[in-house]
Image (cartoon, helix red, strand yellow):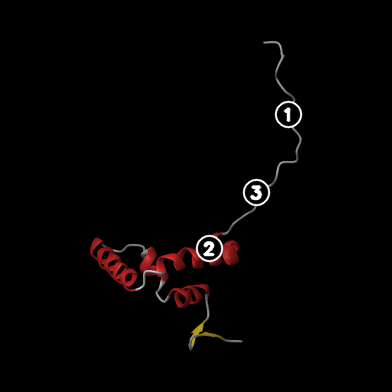
Amino acid sequence: MRTYVGGHQAVSVNDFVELALGTPPQLWLGVEGESEEERAARLDAARDILADNPGLSDDVPRVVAEVIEAHAPELFNVVPLARPTGRRRPSRKGAAA
């Protein structure tokens, strides 16, 4: 089954994020190994986009939270921590020194 959003096919989580935001996530997050010049150009482009669409700054955290909530295990390799059993160590109060 294929999924289309606004006439564009989405095949990965990144595709859905890009289509939801209207921009690639790399614009906001950067890419590994980018130069200072590339970073400055990326940030200039991001500022221009935010100036043209001020509501986007409210949409980004919402979309990110939804993606994390839906895909945290595969994105972050999350392992749930064991909960304490409720047993406590005996108190050391009153113990002879």
Secondary structure at badge 2 equals helix
Q: Specify few, some or many for label 1: CA neighbours under 10 Å numbering under 14, 14-19, or 20 or more.
A: few
Q: Position of residue 51 (x, y in %)?
A: 31, 70
- Give the mark toward the camera: 2 or 3: 2
Residue that lies at the very extreme toward the left in this rendered image: 37
Residue that lies at the very extreme toward the bottom in this rendered image: 7
Q: Amino acid at mark 1?
A: Arg
Q: Which residue is mark 1?
A: 89
User: Residue visible at 76% across and 35% down?
Assistant: 87
Q: Position of residue 76 (x, y in %)?
A: 54, 60
Q: Does label 2 or label 1 sit earlier along the sequence?
A: 2
Q: Which residue is mark 3?
A: 81
- Give the mark toward the camera: 2 or 1: 2
Label total for image: 3
Q: Amino acid at mark 3?
A: Leu
Secondary structure at badge 1 equals loop
User: Residue visible at 48% across and 73% down?
Assistant: 17
Residue 42 marker: none
Contact flag, marks 1 and 3 (Cβ < 8 Å): no
Residue 84 falls left or right of residue 23: right
For this rendering, which residue is in front, 49 or 54? 54
Q: Amino acid at mark 2?
A: Ala
For this rendering, which residue is in front, 58 or 22? 58
Q: Position of residue 55 (x, y in %)?
A: 41, 69
Quadrant of the frame with the N terminus: bottom right
* Residue 2 sits in quarter: bottom right
